[in-house]
Amino acid sequence: MINRLLALWPHPAMLRTLTIRYAVLGVLQGGMLLGLIPLLQALLQSPPDLNLAARWTGIIAVLGVAYLGALWWAKSLGYRIAHLIMRDLQHGLGRHLLTLPLGWFVGDRAGRTARTVAQSTPSAASIVSHVWPELVQSIATPLTVVAGVFLIDWRMGLAFLVTLPAAMVILRWSAPIVRETQVVMDDASSEAAGRAIEFAQAQPVLRATGRAQEGFAPMERALDQQRVAFRAALNRHTMPQIAYIAVVQVGFTIVLVSGALLALAGELSLAETIALLVLAARFVEPLAQVGNLFGTIRVAEVAIDRVAEVLDAAPLPEPAQPKPSGDSTVEFDNVTFGYGGRPVLNDFGIRVPAGTMTALVGPSGSGKTTVLRLICRFWDVNGGSVRVGGVDVRELTTDSLMSQLAIVFQDTYLFDGTLAENLRLAAPDATDDELADAAAASRLDEVVARMPDGWDTRVGEGGLSLSGGERQRVAIARALLKEAPIVLLDEATAALDPENDAAVTAGLTALTSRGRTVVVIAHRLTTIEQADQIVVIDGGRTAEVGSHDELMARGATYARFYRERLTAASWQVGGR
Ligand SMILES: Nc1ncnc2c1ncn2[C@@H]1O[C@H](COP(=O)(O)OP(=O)(O)OP(=O)(O)O)[C@@H](O)[C@H]1O
């Protein structure tokens, strides 16, 4: 546990100091317990030696005061180190997350990362504030007691000692079991939490389809699995727990029987025997404590593993000798790419000249979103190259690439701030006039005018107090404000109401008329007709490229799509 922690937080000297302080604490506690022996001897001999008893009471009291002082001395250091660990791990995670490819965040990673930062770092820090100190103390106290008992009577010392190795064997045996079950319970909890979030988000769909009452099968399955995992884990925990308690109790019995036999044989005085038995009862306490701690240690280890998993994720390689960016042409040259083993893009090639608009169309799953992600370098290609301004994106620094791109994805995420703050994320120094200009071009000004507090209206977490179309207007306004030469846009697939539809068209017109290079996954007929070039993607390849008129004249895939969609009530080229 400590080695794993040190691998993430390499400050062994501080942990050594902490260990010494808690060991001193354990020794002081053991000393107080040992002080009971002469105290009881003085009281139980006939006649009782009250002077001696008073002297030992004084010594125990001094040890008690020293113990309290040492407790403050050790705890304050433990809390300080825990604070440093939490701060360093959270900062380290934050810095590392910034270097990871954006593709790393796709899927359920966002939720897991939130858990790691918010829950696993305090859990890892609790190792030094609670787990390790208690463990050190729980070992130092019994060892001090055993050493003291050896000095009084070596046979009783052996009787005390015999429990320790047996307890260690049981703990070693149970450690992997506890750890394994902890991982299973943790995974089951993550899955159940994920499904519960999905259930909440799917409420509109479930209610619209009349299935809200029946519940939601994936969540029910996940909750069932969680219950089964918890029951199985608790069952597996039971055996090691019983075995450990048995060892401690058997050890206690051995001490009792040995004490009784030695007393009967006249080898121990009555006072010594009673004192040793009192000590045996107190001796068992810290040992039982160690048994409980091992479960907590495994929980902390799982937390460390989760932090390490994020910190071990490979950062996006930055070029050793970055090249300066060129113009805003975007090119795919014989690009091959797949997620895992399955190829998605095969020998894919397109050229988007600077200052023009290209619409990507094609059936669902053909690879349109993947094309946009590769331009942003969410992932690196397996073959060929993606070039921006004539330079391979792998030869541009992330900052330089990102400064050239504005991204408008379907589900625009807005921060829980005001409309103005959300827009200024793209350009913190933008003047009010620039804000107003971007808003007018994307028709966000209409939304601002409708809102009670205008630009100061709070949009709620994720921008949920705005409609999907309104959020996309904010994203387009951001793209206009950012002054990035290339805009990547994934149009909302849901049919927009006429007002939002007109706003997106106006935003696109503004972007192209201001010389931006626009690559758009197009779902609306108006967008496709607006484009300088249409790229039809099918099966990860470029099936057709040309203007609307050229492709219609060819009468192949695009023309077929177009006619189908035109006749459909809700026209969507994406095949949805
Ligand atoms: N993160 C991912 N991990 C694994 N496979 C993925 C991932 N993202 C996409 N895919 C797969 O890659 C293929 C292409 O997906 P992509 O999202 O690029 O298609 P698309 O044309 O944009 O589809 P749609 O129009 O439905 O959004 C699909 O088969 C999809 O299942």
Image (cartoon, grey):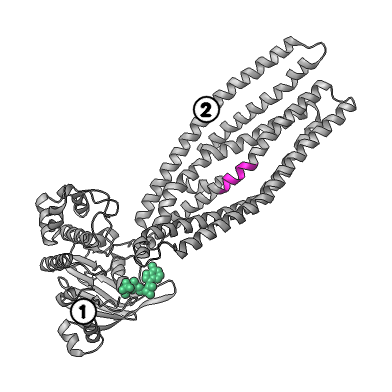
Q: Amino acid at mark 2?
A: Trp
Q: Nearest the camera: 321 or 560?
A: 560
| Residue 283: x %, y % from top left | 70, 32
| Residue 357: x %, y % from top left | 17, 73
Q: Name the quadrant where ligand 1 sits.
A: bottom left
- Looking at the image, which residue is at 42% across and 49% down? 117
Q: Disc number at residue 73?
A: 2
Cβ of mark 1 under 8 Å from ligand 1: the answer is no
> Within the image, what quadrant is residue 50 found in?
top right
**On screen, residue 128 above or below 189:** above
**Count of labels in the image:** 2
The secondary structure making up most of the magenta span is helix
Q: Is residue 575 magenta?
A: no
Q: Secondary structure at mark 2?
A: helix
**On screen, residue 29 above or below 174:** above
Tell me, yes or no, whether the two marked residues, 2 and 1, touch with CB atoms within 8 Å. no
- Looking at the image, which residue is at 89% across and 24% down? 266
Q: Is residue 56 left or right of residue 540?
A: right
The answer to whether residue 466 is visible is yes
Q: How far apart are the two marked residues, 2 and 1, measured between alpha carbons?
A: 72 Å
**On screen, residue 171 above or below 259:** below
Residue assigned mark 1: 534
Q: Is residue 225 left or right of residue 343?
A: right
Q: Quadrant of the C terminus?
A: bottom left
Circle 2 crowding by C-alpha within 10 Å: few under 14, some 14–19, many from 20: some
Circle 1 crowding by C-alpha within 10 Å: few under 14, some 14–19, many from 20: many
Q: Amino acid at mark 1?
A: Ile
**On screen, residue 33 above or below 307:** above
* Region in magenta: 291-298
Q: Disc number at residue 130?
A: none
The answer to whether residue 162 is visible is no
| Residue 47: x %, y % from top left | 81, 10
